[in-house]
Amino acid sequence: MLEIILFKPSHLADIDPPDLLREPMRRFAMAYCDRGPALTFVEDGRVLGCFGLILDGRQARVWGFLSSLLRGRPATLHRMVKGALPKLKRHYGLDMILAEAHPDHAPSWRWLERLGFRFNGVAQRCPIAGERHLRYLY
């Protein structure tokens, strides 16, 4: 049974993102996970994914880490996130939610587009990872 619990940075040890994203994602979460609500999806004691919002007035930046187990269930994941986005906007009184995707990881930015995010350009260089990501707005 799928459970949703409060995120702890130690949950990241159980996530297996693509090698390309592993270290930048870990540094990002460690720097920003305490700046807004964050949750972990757990099933049978295994961490399936971690998600959070970085709140900044009427805007938020979303972050997420998916295990291969959760990536292997795209329909379930898509339904959960697509249903949560408008609720999060209403609950926190947000005008927009920003998401960023690594330009070399096409599954990430394609999924953002299917969720209803629209491309908004290339971000400034990340102070933590030193990379420039693609920006999407919801």
Image (cartoon, rainbow, N blue to C red):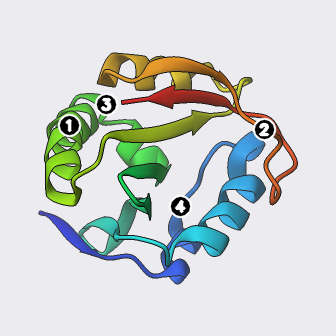
Helix, strand, or loop for circle 1? helix
Q: CA distance from mark 1 to mark 3?
A: 6 Å
Image quarter where the N terminus lies is: bottom left
Residue position marked by numbered label 3 in the rendering: 74
Lower position in the chain sequence, tag 4 or tag 3: 4
Residue position marked by numbered label 2 in the rendering: 124
Helix, strand, or loop for circle 2? loop
Q: Is residue 68 above or below residue 100?
A: below
Q: CA distance from mark 1 to mark 4?
A: 18 Å
- At a point 31% along the width and 24% down the height, the residue shown is 115
Q: CA distance from mark 3 to mark 2?
A: 30 Å
Helix, strand, or loop for circle 3? helix
Residue 108 in view here? no
Q: Is residue 137 above or below residue 38?
A: above
Q: Which mark is residue 76?
A: 1
Lower position in the chain sequence, tag 4 or tag 2: 4
Helix, strand, or loop for circle 4? loop
Residue 48 in view here? yes
Quadrant of res 102: top right
- At a point 23% along the width and 59% down the height, the residue shown is 92
Q: Which mark is residue 57?
A: none
